[in-house]
Image (tube, grey):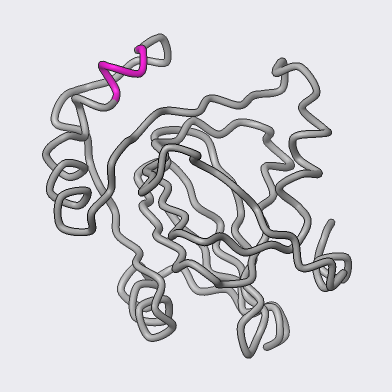
């Protein structure tokens, strides 16, 4: 279940899914919750995971012109996990939307729009961050994210770092 943190409003937390969806949608961020078409286990491979969500994923990809999808699985035993975390923690933008569906685990997206807020995404949460939006991502403290990533280009995830340092105020 997602948790919206209004960081510039005294860290107010919002847990009602409708309120979260409305808040994000008003800012151009798509947020939904998806369920698998069949039960999954922690040992399922990429093909099985993508098939379990194809009823949601394929229509979304077709409607928005996405070309590919894959599954990322980052956990505490992943080599260089702290270096990976630091790469995501620096404020950045992308030249295409950043689309993620959380199959398992959790991670927190931070947004720097007119205000700074974050969304803790967990199992079942889908988010599409529009291209050009300043944001960063933290996989701590659990260091476990299994997510479907969707891309418009073959290059995949390419960050354009802002070097603003804004994230330093909000990193735990």
Residue 61 locus on image (x, y percent): 22, 48
Residue 6 locus on image (x, y percent): 62, 79
Front residue of 2/95: it is 95
Residue 140 locus on image (x, y percent): 73, 42
Which residue is at 53% across, 25% downward? 73
Magenta span: predominant SS is: helix
Which of the 4 image quarters holds residue 114? bottom right
| 18 displayed left or right of 76 | left
Was residue 52 drawn as part of the magenta stretch in this picture?
no
Give the answer, above or below, for where 38 lies relative to 92.
above
| 103 displayed left or right of 11 | left
Which residue is at 64% across, 66% downward? 135
Which residue is at 63% across, 71% downward? 134
Give the answer, above or below, for where 69 lies relative to 119.
above
Residue 83 locus on image (x, y percent): 82, 33
Give the answer, above or below, for where 128 lies relative to 87.
below
The part of the chain drawn in magenta is 45-49
Which of the 4 image quarters holds residue 133? bottom right
Specify the quadrant that holds the C terminus.
bottom right
Give the answer, above or below, for where 120 lies relative to 73.
below
Was residue 48 drawn as part of the magenta stretch in this picture?
yes
Front residue of 4/116: it is 116
Instruction: Spot the residue most to the front.
Output: 154
**What is the total number of numbered labels drawn onto the structure image?**
0
| 134 displayed left or right of 43 | right
Which residue is at 61% across, 54% downward? 108
Front residue of 68/125: it is 68
Which of the 4 image quarters holds residue 130? bottom left
């Amino acid at each position: 279940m997602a948790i919206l943190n209004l960081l510039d409003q005294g860290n107010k937390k919002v847990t009602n899914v409708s309120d979260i969806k409305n808040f994000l949608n008003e800012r151009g961020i798509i947020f939904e919750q998806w369920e698998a078409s069949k039960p999954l286990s922690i040992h399922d491979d990429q093909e099985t995971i993508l098939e379990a969500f194809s009823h949601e994923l394929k229509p979304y990809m077709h409607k928005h012109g996405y070309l590919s999808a894959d599954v990322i699985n980052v956990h505490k035993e992943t080599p260089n996990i702290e270096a990976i975390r630091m790469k995501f923690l620096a404020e950045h933008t992308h030249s295409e939307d950043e689309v993620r569906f959380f199959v398992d685990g959790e991670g927190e997206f931070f947004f720097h729009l007119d205000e700074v807020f974050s969304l803790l995404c967990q199992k079942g949460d889908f988010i599409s961050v529009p291209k050009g939006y300043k944001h960063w991502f933290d996989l701590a403290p659990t260091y476990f994210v299994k997510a479907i990533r969707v891309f418009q280009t073959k290059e995949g995830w390419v960050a354009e770092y802002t070097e603003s340092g804004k994230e330093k105020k909000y990193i735990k």
